[in-house]
Image (spheres, rainbow, N blue to C red):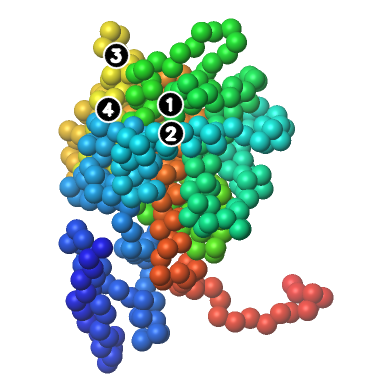
Amino acid sequence: MDIKKDAAKLILEDQQVTLPIITDSMGDKAIDITSLRKQTGYITYDPGYANTGSAMSEICYVDGEQGILRYRGYDIEDLVEHCEFVEVAHLLIKGELPNVQERLLYSEMLNRHSLLHIDMRNFFRDYPQDAHPMSILAAMVASLSAFYPELADADPQANIDLTVTRLLSKMRTIAAFTYRQMNGLDFVNPSYKFSYCENFLNMMFSTSVNAYVPPPLHVRALNILLILHADHEQNCSTSAVRLVGSSDANLYASVAAGCCALWGTKHGGANQAVMQMLLKIHNEGLTVEQVVEMAKDKENGFRLAGFGHRIYKTYDPRAKIAKELCQKVIGNTELDPLLQIALDLEQVALSDPYFIERNLYPNVDFYTGIIFHAMGIPESMFTVLFALGRLPGWIAHWLEWADDPYQKIARPRQVYTGLAKRKVVPLADRV
């Protein structure tokens, strides 16, 4: 990465401080404040880190004003059109798209390491059937380190390749087994006959009394959805992975932390919130005009799920792809009522000055839940699918942090707002 440095001057009372200005490979600028506290005693205050660059990264680029998303230089639209998820995972983790030989080798490794230890399989049966799938996913990912510990004497790079491949493959199996446990079904092992996404759908839906064959349209849809979710710069869950990894925690523990961060309704759980909103509109017979007015009313606790994004100030490029995909999966013969509500809601909202002035456009979560629903995947599994897609990005960021020459444990500062100092009153004298 070609980083050019200029300088900025900061004036604090009678002190002038020179701070480097970093210009990145896309021409964006950042003020390097790593020496600010040492030079001045000051820190910066930035709730939610909206203006703080926590890392230098080569993995993903987002331009929220222009609606651009790229993985290692490739536009998301280009990757969706020409690649499968396994190829994009290779790109994010290895840095380049695989050639034919590398693609075959990668698929072979993923297949070879897709089975779970028999004792791990038994763990699933101890979870209540109504347990949230994300709680199971996070726990089982953390447990992988107990059953597949790192090989201390092995070649470091070979060990990393093995650990990464295990995680990519076994997390898919864990996700499918979680669904089976929820529904009281026997587990279906992965098969060498299927591709990555075919295997997942087969492990989810195949039984001894049906002749299930993964529908090609659903396989293609799953590939696209996983690619759309594969990375997104320093989002909450990715930052959690890097934060935990900075303590020298292993990959499994760091990814388990990412799963927990993703679980929240403001992050990976947002597509589930969209589905619940659409169902509410449908079941209560609300009009989209009523819903839009409810969203605009500050006194009303209703929130329009799936609109607006922390980064994008225009239409989320992933949402455009998801919208088109949603219409293909559902088909044109009889429009799904939830999709019709979503389309009408988008049309009304995007013509309303309230939403236009606030840059409230549909985000990736607005249509993905409808696609999962059409594929027969229950709402409680939506965030699990998000995690499966985001996994290559998490792994890539963990590896990037591990190679970062800065190599300091992440430790944000704070602006203290508590009492300055107090004395302890003996227990007998406390009022």
**Mark 3 lies on residue:** 331
The three-letter amino acid code for the residue at tag 3 is Gly
First in sequence, mark 1 or 3: give its number.
1
- Residue 377: x percent and y percent? 47, 23
**Residues at marks 3 and 2 touching, judged by CB atoms closer than 8 Å:** no
Q: Does 140 sit above or below residue 184?
A: below
Q: Does 129 sit above or below residue 45?
A: above
**Mark 4 lies on residue:** 323
First in sequence, mark 2 or 4: give its number.
2
**Mark 2 lies on residue:** 107
**Quadrant of the image occupied by residue 428:** bottom right
Q: Nearer the viewer, residue 9 or 88?
A: 88
Q: Does 196 sit above or below residue 387?
A: above
For residue 213, side relative to residue 122 (left or right): left
- Residue 318: x percent and y percent? 28, 37
**Quadrant of the image occupied by residue 216:** top left
Q: CA distance from mark 4 to mark 3?
A: 12 Å
**Residues at marks 1 and 2 touching, judged by CB atoms closer than 8 Å:** yes
Q: Nearer the viewer, residue 270 or 125?
A: 125
**Residues at marks 1 and 4 touching, judged by CB atoms closer than 8 Å:** no
The three-letter amino acid code for the residue at tag 2 is Ser
First in sequence, mark 1 or 4: give its number.
1
